[in-house]
Image (spheres, coloured by chain):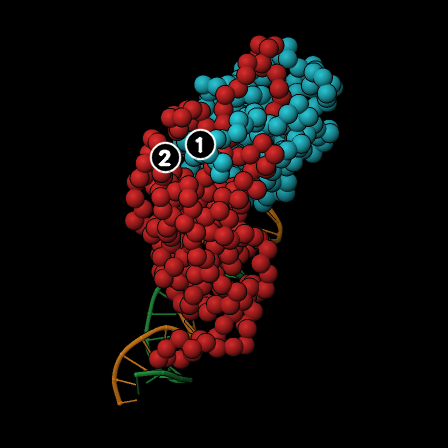
Chain colours: A red, B cyan, C orange, D green
DNA sequence: CCAAAAGTGTTAACGCTACACCCATGT
DNA sequence: ACATGGGTGTAGCGTTAACACTTTTGG
């Protein structure tokens, strides 16, 4: 923050600043993470979280949003800074400090873009991630912990779901992230008592059984609430 | 993270990486923050959180610890990364991304070192901070919120207290940070039921009243526990 | 009529909150 | 003896956790 160093002539700094984005979604009852396959020199063929250097005139949040948009075409989604990783040997090409972000999107609504920079871009089940470059496995683990916390204590679940959804969809998303089963009656009682949801007044056709009610969130702004 | 940019020749980056440290302690029932008074060019005489550039071969945690040690002579204390601030105009001397840290120390045991880099170094009551440079006021506010959360949900309180202390000392620290009064009986019941404390089996002389029992923490390693 | 998911209440255990008095010491 | 902070228990209330059957639809 202060430009001066113990020695009065500050030695030039050779540290680059990057952003890595851990993008989560829930698909068919499982938590998924978006990974890219590296095309360039030292790690050809390995998988990594999408990321990149921060531009000189770019704030950190914008850099994270840009990377998300490059891969998914999605903008205006939930994005939260997680932690900054600064170990010396993370990147063999030089010292890089990386600011990790967490993104949540409704995977059903996204079509991934093949991006020339990478060999491939795809969703992976969190439970079955491949080996990742650098410390990305650790970043993903940290992101998942934070996400679980967020679901229990805030209303962010809206960012994992489409505008309209059933209570079973919502419960399924919770179970996928928390990794445990929830009691149906207690879950519904609690979540409805918080006033976060409003019934849409419609039903859906989901096959050979009683059609479920649809709900939507009353607000899509982040809010601290004890959910579970 | 990945060195490449959309354009194949990555433009050189002109971003510096710094660390700012919000150092808390509790003294005579009030939460205090350590501030330094700036000596150099653009902000002469203003107060700021202690901070400085990260050295090329230095990891972030070490940079934060170094800054703490320079001001207080204290090492081996609780230190936690808070958040990374990256707005464009924080520092008029150029683009600086600052990683904020939170430190907790037992203030009674510390004698501050006058440091040549700064005009002054002293504790300020959190409730009566002066104006601070850049966005430091916001950083301090964020740090205090995090600290309050930490006291409610972990055993970090040990880092604000000496090795031996009374339950009243502990309660006072909680009240100073949380900014509200706690019921004496409920507090004692709860904190003792968690098994975080062990009685030392001694009493102290604290003036004209019944001498209190001394306690110490069973462990001084961070641990998640619902305290309140 | 069968299969499949949706929807719905009650009870018991637990934890939290509120609250007032006696104790040990120094002066 | 009195002033000062240290120390202790209980009852009411709300929240959470456990638990099984009926409903609505499509095939």
> Percent position (x, y) of residue B216?
45, 29
Q: Are marks 1 and 2 in contact (CB under 8 Å)?
A: yes
Residue depicted at 56% across the width and 38% down the height: A60
Tell which tag, 1 or 2, sits nearer the viewer: 2
Q: Which label was assigned to residue A40?
A: 2
Q: CA distance from mark 1 to mark 2?
A: 9 Å
Rendering coords of residue B117 (x, y %): 64, 13
Residues packed near mark 1 inside 10 Å, few (<14), some (14 to 19) or many (20 plus): some
Q: Position of residue B67 (x, y in %)?
A: 55, 19
At horizontal 62% and vertical 21% (from top left) the residue drawn is A2
Q: Mark 1 — on which chain does it sit?
A: B
CA neighbours of label 2 inside 10 A, class few (<14), some (14 to 19), many (20+): some
Tag of residue A57? none
In the foreground, A74 or A216: A74
**Left or right for A106, reference A10:** left
Q: Secondary structure at mark 1?
A: loop
Q: Is residue A146 above or below residue A216?
A: above
Q: Is residue D20 above or below residue B176?
A: below
A5 sits left or right of A70 in the view: right
* Residue at the image position 66 percent from the left and 27 percent from the top: B91
Q: Quadrant of the N terminus of chain B?
A: top left
Quickly name the residue at label 1: B3
> Dot 2: what SS?
loop
Q: Is residue A152 above or below residue A118?
A: below
Query: Mark 2 falls within which chain?
Result: A
Q: Is residue A55 above or below residue A23?
A: above
């Amino acid at each position: 923050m202060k430009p001066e160093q113990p020695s009065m002539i500050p030695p030039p700094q050779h540290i680059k600043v990057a952003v890595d984005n851990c993008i989560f979604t829930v698909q068919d009852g499982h938590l998924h993470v978006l990974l890219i396959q590296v095309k360039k020199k030292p790690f050809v063929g390995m998988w990594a979280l999408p990321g990149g250097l921060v531009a000189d005139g770019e704030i950190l949040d914008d850099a994270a949003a840009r990377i998300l948009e490059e891969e998914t075409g999605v903008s205006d989604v939930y994005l939260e800074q997680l932690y900054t990783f600064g170990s010396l040997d993370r990147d063999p090409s030089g010292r890089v400090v990386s600011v990790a972000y967490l993104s949540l999107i409704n995977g059903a609504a996204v079509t991934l873009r093949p991006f020339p920079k990478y060999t491939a871009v795809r969703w992976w089940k969190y439970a079955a991630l491949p080996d990742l470059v650098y410390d990305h496995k650790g970043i993903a683990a940290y992101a998942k912990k934070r996400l679980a916390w967020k679901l229990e204590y805030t209303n962010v679940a809206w960012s994992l779901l489409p505008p309209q959804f059933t209570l079973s969809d919502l419960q399924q998303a919770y179970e996928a992230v928390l990794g445990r089963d929830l009691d149906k009656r207690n879950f519904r009682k609690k979540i409805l008592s918080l006033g976060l949801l409003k019934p849409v007044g419609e039903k859906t056709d989901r096959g050979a059984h009683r059609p479920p009610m649809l709900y939507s969130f009353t607000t899509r702004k982040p809010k601290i609430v004890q959910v579970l």
